[in-house]
Amino acid sequence: MREVLAQAAFQLFLERGFERTTVDDIVARAGVGRRSFFRYFPSKEDVVFPDHERCLAEMTEFLAAVDDSDPVGAVCDAARIVLRMYAADPEFSVQRYRLTREVPGLRTYELSVVRRYEQTLAGHLRGRFGADGDGELRAEVIAASVVAAHNNGLRLWLRSGGAGDPEAAVDHALDLVRGVWERPAGPSPALEKPALPAAGPSGITAGSGDNEVIVMVASKGTPMWRVVQQIEAAVGES
């Protein structure tokens, strides 16, 4: 029934446009009642994405079953579940992509769907990295990287009209993510501030050796000739 309703809806979206199609139009085309529609879809927007709930559940189940040896590889593999869902029906996926580009409300809805995938991946990584130190940050950044890489490859395929192998571009993008984030996580390097040499007379500081540095500190109202005079004196002394 979900497929029947989704097919009826997309036929009408292509004929009349998304905004001009009502739920009553969809159920009339599908030959069912309104109650049947809302049993499967909370809104007209949901019928555009009929398979994401199932895909999200499959991703969650997959991540719950993987081991802890390669968390970055696991979330990359989980992202491929979404790719396979799109690739299973290229014609429908391309139609949906074009429709979401035309309807601002659907783009907003799509972003909320993407965010749910990202949160699922990040939740899995937090369980592996922990919430202490940079663990939570690392989980969020890697999850965002995986989603961005996956979507970049997927959209290249969708913009081509579904031609060719969708896995090639996505695999390439995810390999870049793995190349960066599969390195062992170490402590963040400390940023050391350069030490300034001790202050000398007249607010002038100077170092020593071949890399000598002179820093001049003067009051805001000090005449420029006075500033230059003090610098020249410091250079002469060094």
Image: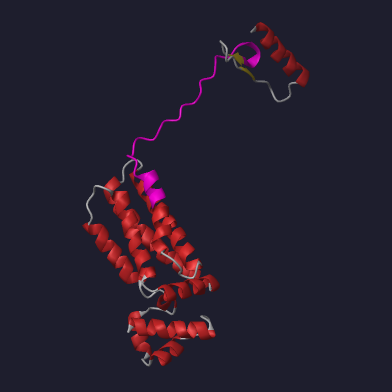
Q: Quadrant of residue 169?
A: bottom left
Residue 86 coordinates in the image, percent (x, y): 39, 69
Range of residues picked out in magenta: 175-204
- What is the number of callouts on the image? 0
Q: Farthest front residue? A: 164
**Which residue is pictured at 38% across the width and 69% down the height?**
87
**Which residue is pictured at 51% across the width and 82% down the height?**
14
Residue 57 coordinates in the image, percent (x, y): 29, 67
Q: Is residue 188 visible?
A: yes
Judge by depth and name the residue closer to the eye, 232 or 3.
Answer: 3
Quarter of the image where the C terminus is located = top right
Answer above or below: position of 1 versus 218. below
Residue 11 coordinates in the image, percent (x, y): 46, 85
Q: Does 160 sit left or right of 33 as displayed? A: right
**Which residue is pictured at 29% across the width and 46% down the height?**
129
Judge by depth and name the residue closer to the eye, 7 or 225.
Answer: 7
- Residue 199 painted magenta: yes
Quarter of the image where the N terminus is located = bottom left
